[in-house]
Amino acid sequence: MAALPPRRPVRLEEALPRRARLVPGAALVTVACLVGDGVERRRALSHPGLRRPVAFLEDVELAPLIDEAAEVATLAVAVRRWAQRITPARALSVGAWLCQEGLLEIHQ
């Protein structure tokens, strides 16, 4: 198996006006998660560079947001759509985390 290229963090400001997709090696996988008082199966973002799959960030479920980002022209459009479900500050925070962790591939 070929080695994955190293993750390259990108600044949110650079990424917003561009198309953003998950980097090679990143995927949504189903894992068991603590939800409220129980355990449920949820999709989580997995990548060899992460210590473990991430299903929630700041109590926000990532998979639906990542799905939505794959359907739109730019990360800015995705963040605006996310801000209709969660607060604008959290939407920007999720976008910034994905960028800082190098989990997004930015296209022109």
Image (cartoon, rainbow, N blue to C red):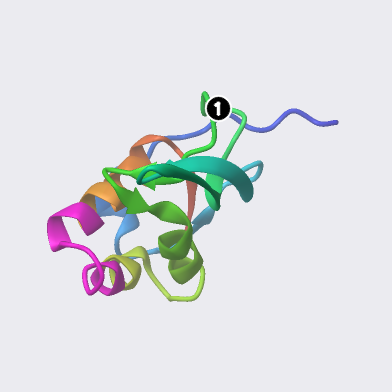
Q: Name the residue under label 1.
A: 49
Instruction: Judge from the rendering whether residue 60 lies leftward or rightward of residue 67; answer left or right.
Output: left
Q: Quadrant of the N terminus?
A: top right
- Write the start and end of the magenta stretch as one range: 80-91
Q: What x and y, as percent, mark residue 61? A: 39, 54
Q: Element at badge 1?
A: loop
Q: What x and y, as percent, mark residue 68? A: 44, 70
The picture quadrant where one finds residue 87 is bottom left
**Amino acid tagged 1:** Gly
87 falls in the magenta region: yes
Q: Is any part of residue 108 visible from this angle?
A: no
Instruction: Judge from the rendering whether residue 47 lies leftward or rightward of residue 14; answer left or right.
Output: right
Residue nearest the viewer, comparing 11 with 28: 28
Q: In this view, does 45 lie above or below 84?
A: above
Q: Is any part of residue 48 visible from this angle?
A: yes
The residue drawn where x is 64% and y is 45% is 24
The residue drawn where x is 38% and y is 64% is 18
- Residue sticking out furthest to the top: 51
